[in-house]
Image: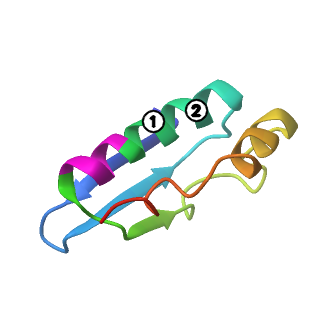
Amino acid sequence: MKYKVWYDETHSILRYSQTEPLNAEDIREAISITVRLAHDTKQRRLLVDLSEGPTDMLDKEARKVLGNTPCPTCSIR
């Protein structure tokens, strides 16, 4: 698995970890999962862990998609 997005009930926070580089489709999928979890759990905090992956985590198209995407948890109230 390239990445994992989940709700950490112990710490009441959304978590994201990534172990392999992502392409644009991976980014779209990860954002969709994050938004759904944020709405379902009413959590706005997201802990991102990139410590297990390579330094080149996103290809050029993936960086562009990520850069054009609004904050996935900012609309949670």
Q: Which residues are magenta?
A: 36-40
Residue 39 on the magenta span:
yes
Identify the residue under disc 1. Answer: 32
Q: For the point 87% across and 39% down, which residue is it?
A: 60
Residue 28: image quadrant is top right
Q: For the point 45% across and 32% down, which residue is it?
A: 1
Relative placement, left or right, of 1 versus 9 is right
Residue 20: image quadrant is top right
Mark-to-mark CA distance, 1 and 2: 6 Å
- Where residue 48 appears, as percent x and y from the top left, is 49, 64
Residue 12 on the magenta span:
no
Q: Is residue 38 above or below residue 26?
A: below
Which is the main secondary structure of the residues drawn in magenta? helix
How packed is label 1: few (under 14 Cα within 10 Å), some, or many (20 or more)?
few
Task: Identify which residue, 70 or 24, lies in the foreground.
Answer: 70
Identify the residue under disc 2. Answer: 28
Q: Is residue 67 above or below residue 10?
A: above
- Where residue 66 appears, as percent x and y from the top left, is 70, 46
- Where residue 38 appears, as percent x and y from the top left, is 31, 53
Going by the picture, which residue comes out furthest to the right?
A: 60
**Mark 2 and mark 1 in contact (Cβ < 8 Å)?**
yes
Q: Is residue 15 above or below residue 37?
A: below
